[in-house]
Amino acid sequence: MKEKLHSRNKNRENYDFESLIISNPKLRDHLTLNKSGLKTIDFSNPLSVKFLNTALLNHYYGIRNWDFPSENLCPPIPGRADYIHYVADLLGEKNGGLIPRGNKVSCLDIGLGASCIYPIIGVVEYGWNFTGSDTNTKSVNAAKKIVDSNPSLKKMIKCVVQKNPDNIFKGIMSDEMLFDVVICNPPFHSSIKNAQKESKRKIKNLTGDKPKTVNLNFAGINSELIYKGGEFNFIQKMIKESYIFSSNCLWFTTLISKQSKLNSIYNSVKKSKAKEIKIIPMGTGNKKSRIIAWSFKSKNEQFSWSKSRWK
């Protein structure tokens, strides 16, 4: 049991590889044994991870068609699901403790990616509507293809291109659009060099090897992993723009991977005149992360919002 995962996470228990192989037979060729003699995969191999994720989405979420170019990120499903579940708890706090479900709930995913993973989980778990934005046109097209090829996702997810990479909400939000929550997994590297260094560290942790080089296709990961100034600058930009659209959204949220930047980001949100700020801890395996959430609405305004939109 992976007790660090959210209690509603479908992946809390150890992977049932026999069932997962039925969902994706290609996974069989990628199985290996760990030091305890239990079945696992090589998590440093992107193809193995992709086959595992395909099986997980099929087995637990009913998604039969999930494919995208190999140069794009292949996200870990359990951690992505945790973010959605914690956001659901956040929305439920001002709704009498009940998580709002159904297509009356509208979410905006900043940095949709080719995998479309956050909207997929949000639609399947809670029936929410999603708009996903990305600066990479190829990624948006790949996400659209996933949506169009799965009946359960059609009419629930809208994929749009952010035409100006210097903007986050501008060009995506308009005055008449309302979102109940914004989610974001920001690019956290400031350069290709830093991305390579982090990839080497991950491979060492997973396999014990010290690779001299890392094969990465940067045509795909630039917009997904790299931003000038890294995660910190991206979130600072996000905070500034969120104030402009403060009346359009109930909660703005983003992941923060670096604990060392948390206090500075918290203070920036506080200076933006947000009326409520929350830090939500997350943990998957040995990795610790956290969500920062902020709202420009008072508690009474939040209750009014939930009554008018979700009842």
Image: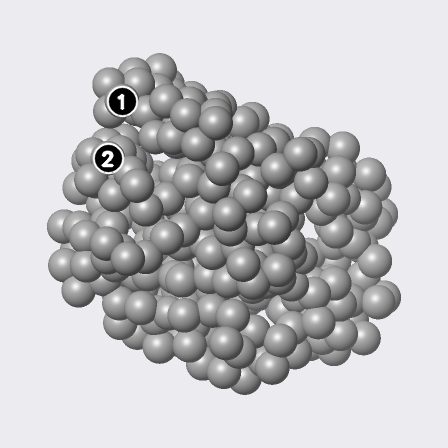
Q: Secondary structure at mark 2?
A: helix
* Residue plotted at (37% across, 53% down): 178
Element marked by disc 1: loop
| Crowding near the residue tagged with mark 2, few <14, some 14–19, many ≥20 C-alpha atoms within 10 Å | some
- What percent of the width, then of the height, locates residue 71? 37, 67
Q: Quadrant of residue 211?
A: top left
- In the rendered view, tell whether residue 176 sits above or below residue 206: below
Q: Are marks 2 and 1 in contact (CB under 8 Å)?
A: yes
Question: Observer-nearest residue: 290 or 205?
Answer: 290
Q: Which residue is mark 2?
A: 243
Q: How is the image coloured?
A: one colour
Q: Residue at x 23, y 62 (%)?
A: 162
Numbered badge on residue 298: none
Q: Nearer the viewer, residue 142 or 144?
A: 144
Pointer 1: residues within 10 angstroms few (<14), some, or many (20+)? Answer: some
Percent position of residue 8, x then y: 74, 44
Q: Is residue 117 above or below residue 269?
A: below
Disc 1: which residue = 273
